[in-house]
Amino acid sequence: MGRQPCCDKLGVKKGPWTAEEDKKLINFILTNGQCCWRAVPKLAGLRRCGKSCRLRWTNYLRPDLKRGLLNEAEEQLVIDLHARLGNRWSKIAARLPGRTDNEIKNHWNTHIKKKLLKMGIDPVTHEPFHKEAKTEESSSISQTDNLLPESGNNNNNNSSMQENDGIANSEENSSSPQENCCSDESILLNSICNDETLLNSLWIDEPPLVDASWNNNNPPATENTNNGEMGYPYPSWEDNCTWLLDCQDFGVQDFGFDSFDNLEFKSLNALEMEDKH
DNA sequence: AAGGTACCCAACCGCAGAAGG
DNA sequence: GCCTTCTGCGGTTGGGTACCT
């Protein structure tokens, strides 16, 4: 259709964001909320493309973001969700409060993929390599089942297989993806993931469960009693943005955010409830 | 200490789909 | 129904840093 570039390339700054730019963007969103991103750079006095502003906000500046590596439970959840949803990072991220699709995608590519390969598991199909070679017709019944028709192997099956030196490691196959998961939460997760009704609900494009309060376009001023319905004690949009800037240095926990597990279970419970309707 | 390599992650790019006129 | 605009998504890139020789 011959789309125009999202912004005039002339005079648009690229590359890493400076603290000053971050401040401007945060200030703008605090006072105006998230409106049309295209207008944000101009209104906020930034020489950035709107897209870049949105990305910066969603991937880095949002105060509800978690920092640091994914913990084991989160990682396991990502693996399970990926087995069912494929490379739909945004959907996966929607199940992991405080995590962004970009973050999960990066973590998948740099950590999880290698981990699975090392265990002799194809990160695309989530099948052990030897099993895959043996019988393709056998509808899998493994825990990382392929309920998903598209589970990531129809459109992007060309990638990531070239590095399958994991075949050489297939003797490690006896260790399932859950081999490291002996904690209670992992057990719980597994049981959740084996719950068919719950899994089915993952296919439904339900409204976002975690970031609603950030996705709405209400001006911050109207949001003084936010987060009640979701049960997330986000700091209120008020006063100035200093807390928000500080937030980047600490992490959501420091603001009394619920731990991942609590949120996760809330999300999963919500899914379950939805499925019953 | 210096150079090379691997790794990580923030940011960019291009496309698809939704929304509105 | 068509066209345009905007947003969001997934793939990819490139700079910074850690590690290795």
Image: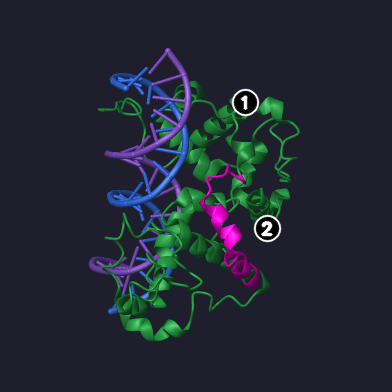
Chain colours: A green, B purple, C blue
Separation of marks 2 and 1 at Cα, in angstroms: 33 Å
**Residue at disc 2, secondary structure:** helix
Left or right of A235? Residue A89 is left
In the image, A92: left or right of A191? left
Determine contact: label 2, label 1, CB under 8 Å.
no
What residue is shown with label 2? Answer: A265
The image quarter in which residue B15 lies: top left
User: Where in the figure is residue A26, as x and y percent of width and height?
Assistant: 57, 33
Q: Which mark is residue A129?
A: none
Residue A240, given in percent of the width and then of the height, sits at: 67, 31
Q: Would you call the spot at circle 1 few (<14 residues within 10 Å), some (14-19), or many (20 or more)?
A: some
Residue range in magenta is: A187-210
Q: Are marks 2 and 1 on the same chain?
A: yes
Residue A98 appears in the figure: yes
- Chain at numbered mark 2: A
Q: Tell me the residue at 46%/62% (across/down).
A: A147
**Residue A4: x %, y % from top left:** 29, 26
For label 2, the crowd category at 10 Å Cα-Cα, with few meaning under 14, some 14 to 19 and many 20 or more, is: some
In the displayed structure, would residue A197 be above or below residue A20?
Answer: below
**Where A268 sits versus A236, above or below?**
below
Residue A211 falls in image quadrant: top right
> Which chain's residue wears label 1?
A
Instruction: Give the amino acid at mark 1.
Output: Thr
**Which residue is more in the foreground, A1 or A214?**
A1
Q: Which residue is mark 1?
A: A31
Q: Magenta region's main secondary structure? A: helix
Query: Is residue A181 within the magenta segment?
Result: no
